[in-house]
Amino acid sequence: MLVKKFGLILTTMILIILLMPSYVVPVKSDIISSPVPIPGNLISTIGPSLPVSSPALPNLGTVSLSPLPISVYSVNQVQSGLIAYDSLTNETKTQQQLQANSGYWTYGGDAPLFNAPYAFWKDTQGLHIGVQAPDNGSWAGYYGVTPNTNAKLFHALVTTPVQTVPSNNNWYENGLYVQNGTGNVSYVVCTSNTSVIGTQWFVAATKGNSFGVTNETILWNSNMDLNEPRTADCTIITNGSNYLKVILDGTPVYESNTMNLQFTNPLVAFLEPQTSYAGQILNGTYQNYYATSDANIHVTNNPVLAAKVDLIVPISSTTGQVVATASVDSSGTATFNMENFTMPLNAYIKSYDSNGIQLASTPNTVNIFGGEVYSVNVNPNTILAPTTNQTNVGISAAGVTASANSTLTASPSSVSSSTSATASVNSTSKSGSVAIKLG
């Protein structure tokens, strides 16, 4: 009798496990339910071709990178927007090494549960995750997943290994998923889909609970054929509630601010291949993962005379290419949308007046990620004094007096008697201020 009861309990436990979605116990976060695959036959094979990506940055003109004789202002970061960044190409590790020391990522999936082959490793080509279905028609997957995050923008370069799978009614999907950070399997995805007739890319949103997906919506799909690219830049921007934007290879393919995503927990990102094809193990490859707090950056506290701010990428030691420009608003802020740039964008940030005269710059190039805030500030050893005309200018600031092109000495009442100041006024300048450099 006791043996029968034990057998009944064991059978019940096995059934519960099999009916539940796959789980992994991450090293650094809560129990996570992995994304449930969207059957390939639910996606139309007809659609536009994937937008052709251009590796070239925008070219809005070239400018000199020569520094100003006197650096009155500086541009400095005051808020970071970077949540996570992993090139995924910076180390070589075997599966055993990653299991022993996974770093930022946690690895798991339902492939082990179904006794399906899987593999993962890292090298200079990226993070590779492979999976094979236990038999044709039965789905299995394996993934790398991030910790919980408050990021709103997620990005990865995704490569699918083959153009076709030689089996009718079987599929291989490989992409970037953004999902609830706990058991709820609601997610949005940017992924490839490969079948016997070719490869396509699609965007979808699902709603679900801890037991699986209850609703699937295909939001956009490309054509499925032998010419669609096997590599794509996927960017997903979402607040987990009403807003979703997906960008493929720098081109927005879907945007809505009336979504009902129902993401109720901090988000996580998955890099995952899933397949129902049992013929061989197929390895997805991923590079340049990053997550940021926003898509925009802000350059605040610009001087009164500032009219615009440019992002400038060096093309030589003395010349830079303007890749983005933004007007300065009435609050002194310039705002850039970074969503179409591959981040980090390594560039100078420079502020100009309406005549194109440089007012401020970062000392060097900076790695720019969405969500960052920069501020233009007067250098601590510089005083700005207003000018009254363009020639023979008399100025007075903090007890320092002088006329144009003169050497200044500060009064002891305002500055240490040993401190001197120099100033130079360009008689042709239209600037409304002059720099007095102390020391």
Image (spheres, rainbow, N blue to C red):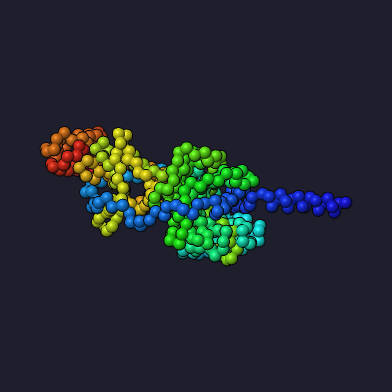
Whether 301 is drawn above or below 57: the answer is above
Residue at the far right: name it: 1
Foreground pick, 403 / 275: 275
Residue 363 location, x and y as percent? 31, 50
Asked if residue 104 lies left or right of residue 63, the reply is: right
Q: Is residue 436 visible?
A: no
Residue 108 location, x and y as percent? 60, 56
Residue at 68% across, 50% down:
19
Residue at 51% across, 49% down:
189
Whether 236 is drawn above or below 92: the answer is above
Q: Quadrant of the C terminus?
A: top left
Foreground pick, 220 / 112: 220
Q: Is residue 334 visible?
A: yes
Residue at 44% across, 50% down:
235
The part of the image, by quadrant, that contains residue 272 is: bottom right
Foreground pick, 100 / 139: 139
Asked if residue 137 lies left or right of residue 416, the reply is: right
Residue 184 location, x and y as percent? 60, 44
